Image (spheres, rainbow, N blue to C red):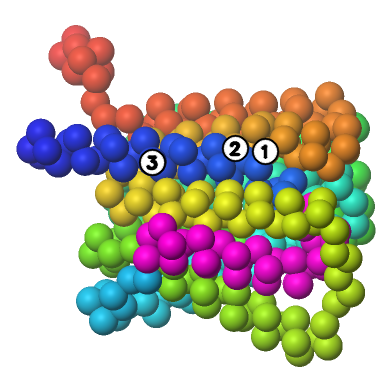
Amino acid sequence: MQAGDIKRRNKSTLIGLIAILLWSSIVGLIRGVSESFGATGGAALIYSVASGLLLLTVGFPKVREFPRRYVIWGSLLFVSYELCLSLSIGYAQSGRQAIEVGMVNYLWPTFTMLSAILFNKQKSNLLIVPGFLLSIVGICWVLGGGQGLDLPGMVDNVQANPLSYGLAFTGAVIWAAYCTVTNRIAGGKNGITLFFMLTALVLWGKYLAMGGEAMTLSLHAFIYLAMAASAMGFGYAAWNVGILHGNVTILAGASYFIPVLSAALAATLLHAPLSLSFWQGASMVCAGSILCWLATRGPRPKTRLSSQS
């Protein structure tokens, strides 16, 4: 790889890391918007405003130059994921549950790492196993409520709102597929503006089909809407650059730290205090991310020396 290519890849990776910071605020902001505009109406407004921001900054892509497979699969997977994400948070019964649903959605970095290993031939070592297991246990710890790892309590918690938790889990799987597929078939193209516009259209279609939802208009609601749309639009624009041109392994590993940042911001925005066991579970997810990152690092001198002994 030439110096110019390395510089471009590092820059793209940095842009992808910025996306992670923006995404950390999304759970709290989406929930705040849905409380005023409804789950579907709020999501439709967020993606509509975000589409406008992307048109002004990224511009509308030349779709005819895109690989057909990327347009089809990219659109299908992206729109499906966004519906799962926004509606799972919007349908949550409380601020605390919205944060828990967001944590379930954050299984996508785990699934993305596994997809990179299975389908993109990303090299790894056995650390991927404890890393994956620790992340999963961390999520279970969070869903167990104040008791920590409590399987009956976790089941009861999920059964209280299976739609939200189910959408969040499905979204995690879909987003991992999107990251893996896009990296292979996009051909360096960026269809994020198109995908956002399609998501907005689907959500407005759902909103109209439902007969509309009651919306509460206020300055507070519009501020949340502007913040959510900005974080969403600019976050995904930056992430798309990262996964298309940056180091996907680094981005997937760093994204494991989103749960702690997201939970802290959401707890503040939604005035939803979190228990010690919640933070313990979130910390396990982050610890698992470090193990997964170590598992996918390239060979090091120490490894070569040990192989010679």
User: Marks 1 and 2: CB-CB under 8 Å?
Assistant: yes
Comparing 15 with 274, the one in front is 15
Drawn side of residue 256 relative to residue 194, left or right: right
Q: Which residue is mark 3?
A: 15
- Image spot of residue 220 (x, y percent): 82, 51
Q: Secondary structure at mark 1?
A: helix
Q: Amino acid at mark 2?
A: Ile
Whether residue 83 is visible here, answered yes or no, is yes
Q: Which residue is mark 1?
A: 262
Q: How many numbered marks have been drawn onto this rendered protein structure?
A: 3
Of labels 1 and 3, earlier in sequence is 3
Which of the two marks, 3 or 2, is nearer to us in this view? 3
Question: Could you give the CA–CA distance between mark 1 and mark 3, rounded to whole angstroms?
Answer: 19 Å
- Image spot of residue 65 (x, y percent): 23, 76
- Label 3 packing within 10 angstroms: few (<14), some (14-19), many (20+): many
Which of the two marks, 1 or 3, is nearer to us in this view? 3
Q: Which residue is mark 2?
A: 258
Residue 105 on the magenta span: no
What stretch of residues is rendered in magenta? 32-59
Q: Residue at 37% of width from left, 71% of height from top?
A: 60
Of labels 3 and 2, earlier in sequence is 3
Residue 48 on the magenta span: yes
Q: Amino acid at mark 1?
A: Ser
